[in-house]
Image (spheres, grey):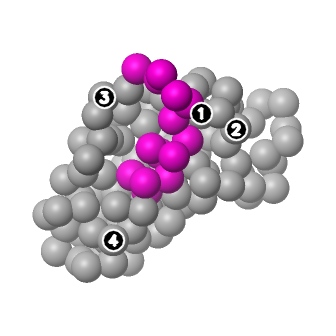
Amino acid sequence: VITCASQHPRIISLCEAFVSWISVLRFHPESTVRRSVLVALSKLVHLVLTPNQFLSLLDIFTDWKDWLISSSTEDPDDQCRSFSLAAISFIVEKLPTGTNFPPMP
């Protein structure tokens, strides 16, 4: 849905609502749910966001940073750890040069 709406003038609001909705699910006990959250977040970052849109959502990604780092090393599911690393990589790739963002691994 977010990918299809990427050209909508209110894409930032849609992304904020979507990330807010999936943020609760990132702590779900089922690894399949956590994997789905990681895939959704990665798709949002990788496919939809331009650098300007990304900067508008920087606070949201800052909030997720600690969880992604923790998940990449501590999640009991191998795929969740791998997906977390991929999400971190996508976020780092989107950061414009000189962006003041807490360090990522």
- Left or right for 25, reference 45: left
Q: Residue at x 38, y 26 (%)?
A: 101
Residue contact at pointers 4 and 1, CB within 8 angstroms:
no
Alpha-carbon span between mark 1 and mark 2: 6 Å
Residue contact at pointers 3 and 2, CB within 8 angstroms:
no
Q: Find residue 82 and report its horizontal and vertical position in percent.
A: 33, 71
Q: Which residues are magenta?
A: 87-100
The residue singled out by tag 4 in the image is 82
SS state under label 3 = loop
Q: Quadrant of the N terminus?
A: bottom right
- Left or right for 26, reference 7: left
Q: Residue furthest front?
A: 97
The residue singled out by tag 3 in the image is 102
Alpha-carbon span between mark 4 and mark 1: 22 Å
**Type of amino acid at the residue the image marks with label 4:** Ser
SS state under label 4 = helix
Q: Residues within 10 Å of mark 4 (few under 14, many from 20)?
A: some
